[in-house]
Amino acid sequence: MLAAMAAPSPDQLRRRRDLARVALAYASALVVALAVGWALRDRHPILVAAAADLVATLVVFGFSVGYNNSSLYDPYWSVAPLPIALYWAAASGPRQVLLLALIALWGARLTGNWAARWRGIGDEDFRYQEIRRRTGRLYWPASFVSIHLMPTIWVFLGLLPIYPALARPSPVVVLDLAALAVTVAAIAIEATADGQLRVFLRTRSDPEAVLDQGLWALCRHPNYLGEVLFWWGLYLFGVAAQPAWAWSVVGPLSITLLFVFVSVPWMDRRLLLRHPAWAQTMTSLPALLPWPRRGR
């Protein structure tokens, strides 16, 4: 009887099967990326990583087309940085160990959060569904450019600052402490916001209610704030190691612009359609920068 009670449901079995398919896609992408890296092993590590990253994206895109679901790419944002960082880690020291540990922690948590919320092959992100409706027969070319290729480029740009921090030995400086504080705070903010949202969605009695407690009482998208801060933390590590790499600010800046001008407006539009109370939230709370609710 206990064994029967513990048996997984058909939905659970289907979800496990679908997660195994995603794992196969990413394992295939990793194998192909390693092969490309080996073939280009005499080139500059940044060029090698960029080529391997692009080919891995193409492999995942192939699986997305095969399963007719662009959400197979979603974990790429949090999965790809660690292999790239490990490849670049030619030097060894406290900064390198700390950076790799922070990237691994961030990636594992974000990927786990995605896996916990993803319902399977039949579950495609609402944004991708909107692009599908807008583009019709051109959906897959549009998906490749906007859903697969561009995020890969944004993440790679965001990782550029850490190359000198991982590849070149240099002493730890005061700016490393600021980088550590920003990166740890970013991971904590994003994890806390995701946890508060998860509890709210599980326990709310009114489907039209909006979350306005905890970090969500300070800004509309604290999870996005944590994500943006994470990339600025990586940037500070890079500048601490090599001030001449200040130009790599293009990485965190591009990711910040992505969230400010794409992710936040898109999510606000969706919440407005599903939750009428969100209109009031938009007038009383800033999008990203924490601030007490106006009017209280």
Image (spheres, rainbow, N blue to C red):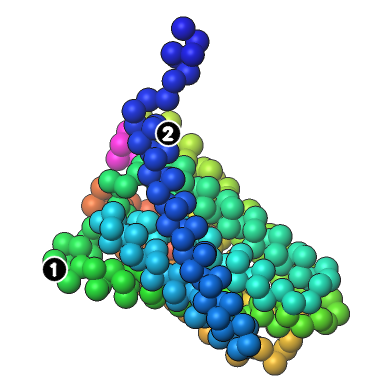
Work out whether residue 68 or residue 187 is closer to the camera in this orientation and state it: 68
Q: Which residue is mark 2?
A: 202
Q: Residue furthest bottom?
A: 244
Question: Mark 1 near mark 2, Cβ–Cβ under 8 Å?
Answer: no
User: In the rendered structure, which segment of residues is drawn in magenta?
Assistant: 206-211
Q: Residue furthest top?
A: 1
Give the residue drawn at x 81%, y 81%.
169
What percent of the width, then of the height, locates residue 267? 34, 59
Instruction: Check the image and report above or below for 268 versus 211.
Output: below
Which SS class for mark 2? Answer: helix
Task: Name the quadrant containing residue 147.
Answer: bottom left
Q: Badge 1: few (under 14), some or many (20 or more) residues near its Cα, within 10 Å? A: few
Which label sits on residue 137?
Answer: 1
Which SS class for mark 1? Answer: helix
Work out whether residue 186 or residue 51 is closer to the camera in this orientation and state it: 51
Determine if residue 146 is in view: yes
Give how far apart the Cα atoms at labels 1 and 2 are: 37 Å
**Which amino acid, by three-letter code, is at mark 1?**
Arg
